[in-house]
Image (tube, helix red, strand yellow):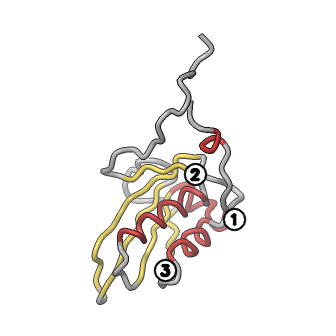
Amino acid sequence: MKSLTELYKVGSGPSSPHTMGPEKAARIFKSENEDAERFKALIYGSLAKTGKGHMTDKAIIKALSPFPTEIEFVPHADFILPHPNTIDFFAYKDGRQTTSMRAVSIGGGDIVIEGREEMLSPDVYRENSFV
């Protein structure tokens, strides 16, 4: 079983997959691109369709501040999304793109970053069933 801190999380609302997950992904991207001058995020699928109302853009901008950040909502991507809550992040320096990262917000504030091991917390309690 996961820790109770994994079950109950406090973060930006009103929807954890639409705010906590994207904000967490943006913070990771920012920490890995400290020399960037600006950022861009393409928000796809479900996040794009409901992102304004759920403040997805505000959560990402907050996480990437104080750097200028462009947010683009793409409700209908021209490729197959790996998940309905997909975000592409781009970092720029000297007027050119330096790197990118694709993340999906899988719910509960958890994310999966494409091409990386899943960032799952280890089980804390040995009990994991009623058997």
Q: Position of residue 91 (x, y in %)?
A: 36, 76
Q: State the image quarter where residue 90 is shown.
A: bottom left
Pointer 1 residue: 53
Quadrant location of the C terminus in the rendered image: top right
Residue 72: mark: none
- Amino acid tagged 3: Thr
Residue at the spot 31% in from the left edge and 88% down from the top edge = 95
Q: Residues within 10 Å of mark 2 (few under 14, many from 20)?
A: many
Check the image and report above or below for 89 versus 8: below
Pointer 3 residue: 69
User: What's the CA distance linking mark 2 and mark 3?
Assistant: 21 Å
Nearest-to-viewer mark from 1 and 2:
2
First along the sequence among labels 2 and 3: 3
Q: Nearer the viewer, residue 69 or 7?
A: 7
Quadrant location of the N terminus in the rendered image: top right
Q: Nearer the viewer, residue 26 or 48?
A: 26
Q: Residues within 10 Å of mark 3 (few under 14, many from 20)?
A: many
Under tag 2, what secondary structure?
Answer: loop
Q: Position of residue 10 (x, y in %)?
A: 68, 55
Pointer 2 residue: 109
- Amino acid tagged 2: Gly
Q: Residues within 10 Å of mark 1 (few under 14, many from 20)?
A: few
